[in-house]
Amino acid sequence: MSPVFNYCPRDGRHFREDELICPLCDFQRTVDPGPSTQTGLPPKPRHPWRKLLYVKQEYPDNYVDDTFLEELQKNANVRHYEYWSVVLESTVISQHISSIVIFVAVFIYLYLEDLSSHALITIGTVGTAIGYGFWDWSNSKSTPGSNFQRRKIFKGAGLFFLTLLGLTPILKTLTEETSKDTIWALTVILFLANLAFHDYGSGNRRNIKYPGSLSTNAAIFASVVLASRLATNLHVFGLMSFAVEWFALFPMLRRQVKSISNRGNLALTVMLFLTATTLFSQISPAIVVIYILGMIFLTFVCPFWLIWIQRYKNEIHGPWDEARPKIQHGRSVDYN
């Protein structure tokens, strides 16, 4: 008579009364007596499980052995931050916020005619010349054999400002049919877009790429909207030329300073902060208080918050992750 198993001898699973075959390994509950069963010998052991999908094995597809979690890794790629290094990196954000505040203050002074267009054009031109001289000197110092085509740059800058001067009457009347409330609301939205899409982490000091280009376009569009509310064409030209210098060229100079010297980067941050505070102190003391509190929160509180909340990060890696090929660059292959 064939023996009847209550437990599967292969995987130890308990048979139900109506089960004749083990659903895990297809072992028959009632087997014919053979040499091994008659002598009481255990069934032939299975081959050890291997983590290979292309090999047919005596195990179900969802089988997991005891070594499955041996390769589990927790927080393997977590970067541990230091407080003052994070504070130093946050100056990139505070510098850009200060730049937007300074530009808005300059527009208000122009709009109230407390600042002449001649003074703004002079300050912008002198500042651009000094900034370009520093940028050219630092680049030539880091790469002595490079040629930055100064003549081509000067020619392009002159052509651009002549074109901007010719378009000034059009820009002045661009939104004259639009209400002031719509202009102010649109300006706020555009500057928020500029703040959100600005390229904070790029080390590229010469070219502006997406989404940095979107941020620059938003700032220039906001400048066009604001410039259309000024009194004269010269005011419009002064604000637009300052906007191009401030939002297109000045970020490149800031990245250059940051890559050269941490002290210079800190000095530039403090200078922008003091300039924004001084300009807006004559406009709205309440905004100055909000701006100072915001800078303190962004520069000193947020880094501490980031380091504190990092303790709750739980990133796991294991054999269930997708495979990532390791590509070796710069390796030559000889086919001869």
Image (cartoon, helix red, strand yellow):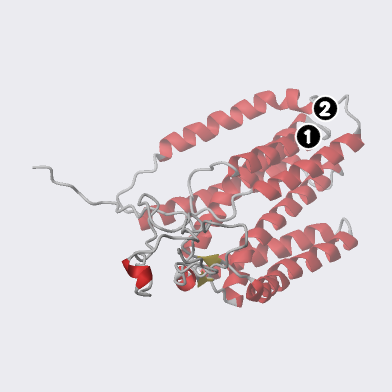
Residue type pointed to by label 2: Thr
Location of mark 1 (residue)? 225
Q: Earlier in the sequence, mark 2 or mark 1?
A: 2
Q: Position of residue 284 (x, y in %)?
A: 89, 58
On the rendered image, what quadrant is the C terminus found in? top left
Along the horizontal axis of the image, is 251 left or right of 321? right
Q: State the count of labels.
A: 2
Q: Count residues near mark 1 (Cα–Cα under 10 Å), then give few for <14, some for 14-19, many for 20+.
A: many
Residue reaching furthest to the front: 1
Location of mark 2 (residue)? 175
In this view of the protein, which residue sits in the foreground, 301 or 264? 301
The numbered mark at residue 25 is none
Residue that appears at 49% across and 58% down = 321
- The answer to whether the residue labelled 2 contacts the one labelled 1, judged by CB atoms less than 8 Å apart, is yes
Q: Quadrant of residue 310?
A: bottom right
Residue that appears at 57% across and 30% down = 160
Along the horizontal axis of the image, is 223 left or right of 9? right
Q: Quadrant of residue 50?
A: bottom left
Q: Count residues near mark 2 (Cα–Cα under 10 Å), then give few for <14, some for 14-19, many for 20+.
A: some
In this view of the protein, which residue sits in the foreground, 136 or 117? 136
Which element is circle 2 on?
Answer: loop
